[in-house]
Amino acid sequence: MRSLFYSFLGYFLTPAGLVVMGALDSSMIFFLPLGIDVVVILLAARKPELFWLYAVLAAAGSTAGAGLTFWIGRKVGQVGLSRFIRASTLKRVERSVGESAAVSVAALAIIPPPFPFTAFVLTSGALGAPAWTFLTTLTGVRMLRFGVEAALSAYYGRGILAWMQSRTFTVTVGALIVLALVGTVASGAALAGSLRKERRSKRG
């Protein structure tokens, strides 16, 4: 199972891979709860002297992915949100998002899953939240989140690396891989279905 882990996430355990993981983590398709956090923790544990760099790269990738999601929300508008977000979630998100809530909503980037952050980003774009304020705040909050994680991992690195050799780690990794595959397929299928409906409505 450990070899499967490195074949699945091995690419992401590099500086470039960390940026890609950060972008995917903020996208509408890829689904791996705490995936970016796990990569930051593992990289910082392996090379404690570079913990600050991993925090910066993770925040940069995360902001890039969120920026794309924000732009998609701006393009689809409020009317198109229902094609991408479940009705129950959309009502809750719309109550929290508005032009004056850009900073507070972006600050929610510090909250880990299962908080539906991607839905908030998409809705913020659709409802016209100021992009510069939103993304700047998001970057700062992500830097704080990943910086704390990386610093703690650098300090407790030996313990983390020892845990990676345990059976608990193997079981946890297996569960994450299954969750990522199932979630990504389901998210991709839902997005593809939404896009098909949108094309049909435009043709009709």
Image: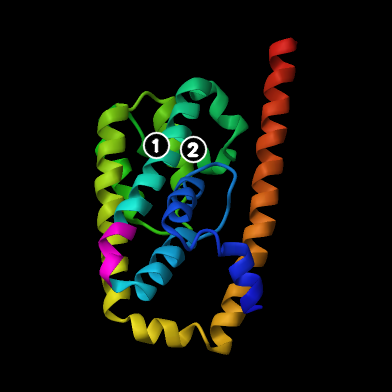
Residue in the foreground of this view, choosing between 100 and 154: 154
Q: Main secondary structure of the magenta part?
A: helix
Q: Is residue 36 above or below residue 28?
A: below
Q: Amino acid at mark 1?
A: Arg
Disc 1 residue crowd, few under 14, some 14–19, many 20+, Cα 10 Å: few
The residues colored magenta run 49-54
Side of 173 relative to 14 (left or right): right
Q: Amino acid at mark 2?
A: Lys
Q: Quadrant of the N terminus?
A: bottom right
Q: Is residue 41 above or below residue 88?
A: below
Residue shown at the point (58%, 53%) measured from the top left:
31
Measure how far apart labels 2 and 1 are at the Cα level. 6 Å
Write down the residue under mark 1.
95
Q: Is residue 59 visible?
A: yes
Scheme of image coloration:
rainbow
Side of 190 relative to 20 (left or right): right
Q: Is residue 145 above or below residue 117?
A: below
SS at mark 1 in the image = helix
